[in-house]
Structure formats: structure tokens, C-alpha cells
Amino acid sequence: MCLSVNELELKYGCNPNQKPSRIYMKDGSDLPITVLNGKPGYINFLDAFNSWQLVKELKEATGLPAAASFKHVSPAGAAVGLPLSDVDKKIYFVEDNAELSPIACAYIRARGADRLCSYGDWAALSDICDAATAAYLKAEVSDGIIAPGYTDEALAILKTKKKGNYNVVQIDPGYVPAEQEHKDVFGITFEQGRNNFKIDAELLSNIVTENKDLPEQAKIDMIVSLITLKYTQSNSVCYVKNGQAIGVGAGQQSRIHCTRLAGNKADNWYLRQHPKVLGLQFVDGIRRPDRDNAIDIYTSDEYEDVLAEGVWQQTFKVKPEALTAEEKKAWIATQTGVTVGSDAFFPFGDNIERARKSGVQYVAEPGGSIRDDNVIEAANKYRMVMCFTGMRLFHH
């Protein structure tokens, strides 16, 4: 696979017909990565390099270990390494006796944002991958991982995944890319300055709402949201709670569709914590993906697909009671303390109205719409705290 330290030949590009394919350094320098196991592909490396930037910047901005779970060049989730609650452990399928380091908690929470979208993900860690993180990853369906290093025990565990073919990439944490970046489209080369914009707490000083009470945890959540958006295909909106993305709406042409998509994902994340969901009794030996799919269908309007006679017995020991629309609405209404970020301004107050339904109390967006007054008015109506960052975060 390796032609030289400057170049890696790949099997193919985005699709099997796109050959030849490689990654290389134009300036003739060494690649800042080492493939420790497996044979990563073109899209794997796109995920790896985007996700590494996200976790690196998140660690720098918060001082906390950070992790991301990427699929098709957008994060399914991202999080910092705060401790897991007992409910977290249950909904993320953490074994009772599992040892959990801060970086392991970060990845478990990142993957837990949207476990369906994280199926077959690319994992990224800001810190050295330890045995605790590797042990959790071993039980999940994942394509690969990038980190600044691996303990011997962690590497040994990861090398057992996918019949020994799991992709493990180590990146030089000191690598700094060139200031100018290039991209070819239809034979035409685009050039732009790299997006080095720094996202930190200082960016949150312009609070435009009547309520200006911004707790430290909300500041961290805003930073998680904005850095996640910086590496998400635009348009994008991200909901965050307690240092964890709980809903990412990526790649929609309409801002309100982003807000709805991310909000629906945040609602699904919260529904996994409903007592009826926590009480589901699964058959012995059920695979994690099957359990995730069953929960997703059970909490959706298509719940009859898993509760029909002759079907539920394949998944559950005891037939569950349906989770009614009224019960779901009442449960989601108890959600509070959520932050929402947007990669560009909210053009209308309808985004605030939708975000409120998912427990949003804090908002971070660039501002700059001709209808900013309407958006601020909507936020004031619900006593939200909203920061205008003044910086768009489009990513393509």
C-alpha cells in the first residue's frame, strides 16, 4: 500500500470506478500519518482528517478530551470527556464493570448522539487511545480510528476487529497544514485560505437577548456546537447538552430543515431515556445494531413494525406496551438546558420556535440577517440566551 513516506496508494476514490487514487503531500514532505493497521480508503481518510481537526480544536478550546464519530464527511456526533451517568451507561450499552477513562467517555458520548448514523463510523480521538476506549470500540461496528497515539494494549485490541483488518491511523499531533488549500472540481482548481478561525469562549461575548445569564456549562456546549458545525457539511445546525452533540442536521438547503432534522434527532436521543425504553427486555444474544434499530422503530410512528404478533418475539422477551404519541410529547416537553448552534444566521424566528420544542435555552449563531430583530424577539419570548458570533462556518 505504501509507495513512499510521502504517498499512500488507495484502492479507489469515492467509488470503485474512480482509479487510480492516492493521498500525497504536494510539497514532497512526509505524510503526517502512519497506518498502523488495515487499508483505509478515500472516504475513510476524508473522515479521518476532518474528524481529527474537530477533536483537536475541541480539546484546545475546552481543555477536555474530545472525540467524534464521523460518517460521510460529517459528524454523527461529537463530545468532550465528561463522566457518564447511570442512564448514559444504559442507553450506550456500557458494561457494568467497564473501566471508563475520560477519552473513553468522550467517544461513548460522541457515538451515543445518533447510534444509527454512527453505524460503521470513523472514530477520532484528541488523546492517546487507551484500552478502555479500544474495548468499547471492539464491540461496535466501526470502519476505523484516528488518534495521536495508542497504548500497546489498545492497539492489540483494535487489531482484532474486522478479522484483523480494522483501520488504525496515527497522526502527528504537531502537524500544521499549509495556509492555502486547493480543491479540483471539473478540472478547475479552487484555492482558499484554510479556515483557521479560532472558536473559544471569547467568541460568546456578544449576548443580544434580554437574558444574559450564560452558565459555564452552556459556554462549553456552545463551543462543542460551533466546532462541530465547522466540520459539518452545510447548511448545518447542532443541538448540544452537557458537552455532547445530541442532534446534528447536516447538508440541508433550507435552514429550518436543518433545525427540524437536528431537533428530531435530539428528541430521539432523549426518548431513549424514557422509562418505557429503559425497561425494554431484549432477547438474549441480540446484536447491538439490532437493538439500536428496534429502539429507533419503537420510539417512532412505525412502532407497530416491531410490536406486531410474530415479530416482537424476535427482539423482546416480553411484548412492550406502545410508547404513545401523547407520552412522547409529554416526555420531550421535560427536556431542558439544551444549546443550539447554527453555521449561518437564522433567517426567521421559526428556527427558534422549533428549537424551543427540544428544550433549547441557549443559542449561538452568527447573526447578520435582515430579520435579526424577529429572531431576537422569538428568543426573548422564551427567555433564551442568544449569542451572535459574527462568524459564518460554512463547510464544503
Image (cartoon, rainbow, N blue to C red):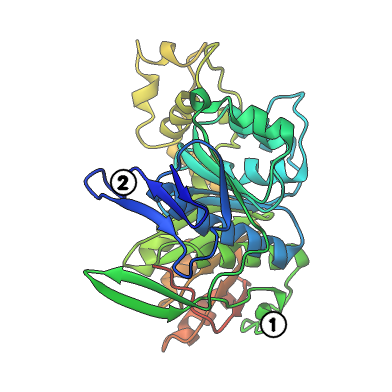
Which amino acid lies under the numbered mark 2 shown in the image of this protein?
Tyr
**What residue appears at the point 42 percent right and 80 percent down from the top-left corner?**
192
**What residue appears at the point 34 percent right and 42 percent down from the top-left corner?**
11
Q: In which quarter of the image is the N terminus?
A: top left
**Residue nearest the observer in this picture, 190 or 298:** 190
Q: Determine if residue 270 is in view.
A: no
**Residue nearest the observer in this picture, 280 or 186:** 186
In the picture shown, does residue 263 fall above or below 196?
Answer: above
Which amino acid lies under the numbered mark 1 shown in the image of this protein?
Ser
In the picture shown, does residue 63 fall above or below 170?
Answer: below
Q: Determine if residue 59 is in view.
A: yes
Find numbered disc 1 in the image and state the secondary structure of the residue it sits on.
loop
**What residue appears at the point 39 percent right and 22 percent down from the top-left corner?**
306
In the picture shown, does residue 90 fall above or below 41?
Answer: above
In the picture shown, does residue 272 fall above or below 30?
Answer: above
Picture coordinates of residue 234, whole percent (x, y): 40, 66
Picture coordinates of residue 25, whole percent (x, y): 47, 64
Rendered image: mark on residue 205: 1
Marks 1 and 2, the one that precedes in the sequence? 2
Q: Quadrant of the C terminus?
A: bottom left
- 1 or 2: mark nearer the eye: 2
Rendered image: mark on residue 12: 2
